[in-house]
Structure formats: C-alpha cells, structure tokens
Amino acid sequence: MRADKSAPLINQPPAKSAIEYRRLRAPQLHGETLQVPSLSEAADLWSANLALNHDHVSLGEISLAKLQQLGRAEVVDQAVAYTGQYLNVESPIRSAEKILMAGHQPELFHPGVWYKNFALSHLAKQFDGIAINLIVDNDICGNTSIRFPNVDGDNVSVGTIPITQPGPNVPFEARQIEDIAFFEKFPSRVGKAIKPLVEHPLVDRLWQQIADGRQQLGEIRLGQALAMGRHRLENEIGLATLEVPLSLVSQTEAFAIFAKSVLMEIERFQTVYNTALNEFREIHKVRSRSHPVPELESDGDWIECPFWIWDTDQPNRRRLFIRQLEGLIHLTDRAGWRVEMAPKTFCEQFQSLSKQGFAIRPKALMTTMFSRLILSDLFLHGIGGAKYDQLTDVIATRFFKAVPPNFMTLSATMKLKHNLETAEPNDIARIDPLIRELRFHPELHIRPEMLAQAQGFIDAKQEWIGESNSQQNSKARHDSMARLNDQLRAFVEPSVEEAMMTKKRMQSRLRASEILNSREYSFCLFPETLIEDLGQF
C-alpha cells in the first residue's frame, strides 16, 4: 500500500509541554495509508521509547518504574487469560518489558481502524515484543447498526443494517445481545444489502468465528462477541496479538495505584487538566465546551474526577466526584452513592468496589495516559486518538513530570469497488457555464437551419447591445434584452433541457460518488481480498 508522505515523519515529545496545532488527515486514495512516523522509521521511535528514563519519577509512594513493572505483569497475565478463553494461547516467553498496544471500542469499525491491528502484530514480531489490543468497553454502546451504500440500479443512497435489536444506552461491557436469533441472521441481511457490490463479504467468515467462539464461551455480551469474532479471524489469518478489555484492566492493583496518585492531588490535577484543555481549544480554535472533552468541574468542595462510576446492575454512567475531609477520601456520584476510604487502604477498597457491584472506569484521556505511561512502550493510535493525545502528553508531563512513550499514528483508506458511473465536482462546474450561456446568450447555440427564423431577434438584440447604457434608457434596455433572450431561448429549448438534465444527472452521480467512495464502511462489508490488502508491509 502507498504511504502518505505528506505527514511529518515523527512526533517529537513535548519538551516544553507545549500544545501545537497538529494536522492529520485521512488518506484520500484507495490503498493509501497514513503512517506517522512511517513504518520504516518505527525502529527509531521504538528505541527512543525504550531509552526513556523514569527512574526518578514517583506516583505517590511508588516509583513509576515499579508501577510500570507491576502494571505490565498484570496486563500480560490478564490478556493471556482472557484471550485463552477462545484461542489457544501460550504464556509469552518474552519479557513483559516490551509491550506494544493499540485499542478501540468493540465495534464493526472501518478498515482504517482495523489496519492498526495488522500493524500491531507486524511491529511486535519485528521488535520481539508482546502485542496487546485493548478493548475499550467502557464507552457507550450507542449505535448497533452499520451503514452501507444502498445501490438500486443507478440510484445510490446510504442505508443501515442493524446488528441487533435496539437496547439500553449503556457501556459496551454491560450491553447484552437483545435478540440472539436476529443477531445470528446479520450476515444474511448484510449479504442481501451489499450484493450489488460484493458477492462474498467478510461478514460470513466473521460471523462463523463468532458462532464458534460463542459455543466455547456461552452467553456473552454484544461488544465481547464482536471483538472475540474479529480476534479469532485475525488469529486465523496469521496475526499474533493478545486482547484484554479495559473493564478488566481497570480492576488491577496498578490501576488503583494510578487512580490514587491522581485523586490524592485532585485539585492540582484539575488545574493542570483544565489549563491544558483550554490551551488545546485555543490553538485548535475549538468553541465547544465539550470538545474534545469537558472540563473537570467543582461543586462546592467536591471536585470532579477523570473517571466514570456506575452500578453494574443499572449501568448508567455518572460522573465521579471527590473531596478529602478529616483525613478520609470521600467519593460520590452526586446522585445518592457515596463511599469513604482511608488513604492507607485506598487501593484495597478501590479494587473491592467491583465485588460490591460498582464500576469505576477511566475517561478517554486517562485511558491512553495509563496505557502509554504504565502499560506499554509503544501505542498505535488512529487519527482521532493522535490528535487528542497531544493533550494527554501535556497533562502527563505537567502532572507526573514524566513524558509518556511516544506513539504512532496509523490509518488506511479502503473503498468498496463498483462499476457505476460517477462524477466529480469539476464535472458540474463545466456544465454551469453552458447553462448560463444558454440563458443569456442563446443566439450562440441556435442551429444553422433555424438562424433565418431567429435573425430578426438577433439583430434587435445587437442593436440594444450597441447602444450605450444610460440613466434614461437603462430600464427599457434591460427589459428589451430580457424579452429578446426569452424569444431567442425558444430556439434552443432542446439544448436547455439537455443541459439541465445533464446537470441533474451529474449531481446524482456526484452524490453517488460521495456515498460509494466513503472510507467509513465496516470492514465486514468488504470482500476477503481486504485481508491481503491490509497485510501488505
């Protein structure tokens, strides 16, 4: 695949904790990839990350180096155990000191996202490291359908195919498959919808992997099923990675220590977080107060934390607030739930919350901060994550006094093939001058055999053209010219109709082009040749 060479070659660590405008654009051409830095330069980035010295950095009562050692051992053990439920996995012989990570929500994402998993496996083999894909299952499972180009003859529109029946607006880790029978028939719905473009889509192979995995695991949640099926498919085609849900990682001792280091200094963290966020918005000219993330708020002596809280029985995400009073840490959702913790036993109490039916999960920036600073030596981001993680770098550098290992930005553009006639904006731009000329200078397009009939109108128009425009004759000149153009237009009416029909046809083809050339369709709609295309390194 072609690599986009327009991007900068390497992300430099923010030496002065400064936020700079970063322009990252998705590749436009089919088969083109975005690589920042390029894969050929990944070894230099890998070496630089391994050389980072965090020996003198502490997170509360523990050194960053020791927390990294703990966190990596825990995440490797978790990933081996979790993946081993549906794949034959041997415990890695390699040291947990070399970990590459990527992550995404458990969705049927587009090929540009899937490309990261291919690169993750490729780089881990190259660097003799352990590849772990983080399943970000604490995000809300809002949309349970995929979009597709609906081709009906020459008509093209955007359609949707439901994966499962509508359900509650809850995190992926809590979202059940509402109707198993309906879910199992998803491939037939996809096959029928995409048949005009793809004869044998990947969804059949993917869903077979899901079915085989469900026989091993029994009843599983929606996101778990989609991620497990995809991972089994990746394993079948030769990718060598482990997977682990964020919901499990959030229950580790390392995560509890990380959370404590933030919560014990929440006022300073809030200042660092909000200041960096406002700098990001100013530099990127973002007006929305919720983009890329909302500020951490205060409510009296309660300060908002960068974590979510919910009951596992009623998994509605709520904001988590903290205050320190009389030597105790008080946590609340400001909606009835509240717990008190002693600093000395905070980590034990924090981890025990899951056994009590409560989930505390990191918000977006904290997820990648923990993953990059504690768990891995190299993180592979997509375009969106790469833009926002510049903010993560600044927060981590200012708060922890530690620069996280740098990351790579990877994406790819794959488009569904078709044989339909399409159009470009320039095609419409070329027809507009003709339509204007037919309106205001129809005499230029009158066929020779009709010129004699039109000559009188042409001569009259030429007389008005030759007469200077003045205040006295301005209205008469305008009205006469308009009337003569109307009379002359009668001689070119077929040409006018043909030009308008051409424009309408071009507009329809342009809309079809925009729909057909989208890079955002799920990988499961593509033919199996997509696997070979994404695996070219």
Image (cartoon, rainbow, N blue to C red):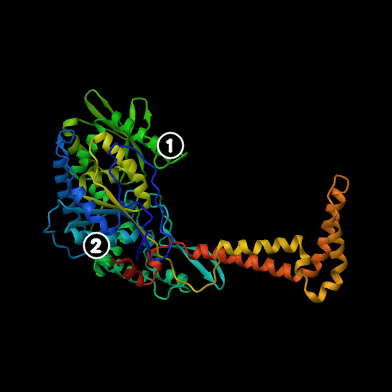
Is 298 situated above or below 237?
A: above
Q: Helix, strand, or loop for circle 1?
A: helix
Q: Position of residue 122 (x, y in %)?
A: 24, 62
Is 195 situated above or below 430?
A: below
Q: Position of residue 528 (x, y in %)?
A: 35, 72
> How many numbered marks does the figure carry?
2
Please say if the residues under marks 2 and 1 sit with CB atoms less than 8 Å apart. no
Residue displayed at 21% across by 48% down? 49
Residue 309 in sight here = no
Q: Position of residue 296 (x, y in %)?
A: 36, 34
What residue sits right under mark 2 in the picture?
122
What residue sits right under mark 1 in the picture?
282
Viewer-proximal residue among 27 and 87: 27
Is 40 situated above or below 69?
A: below
The quadrant in which residue 83 appears is bottom left
Q: Amino acid at mark 1?
A: Glu
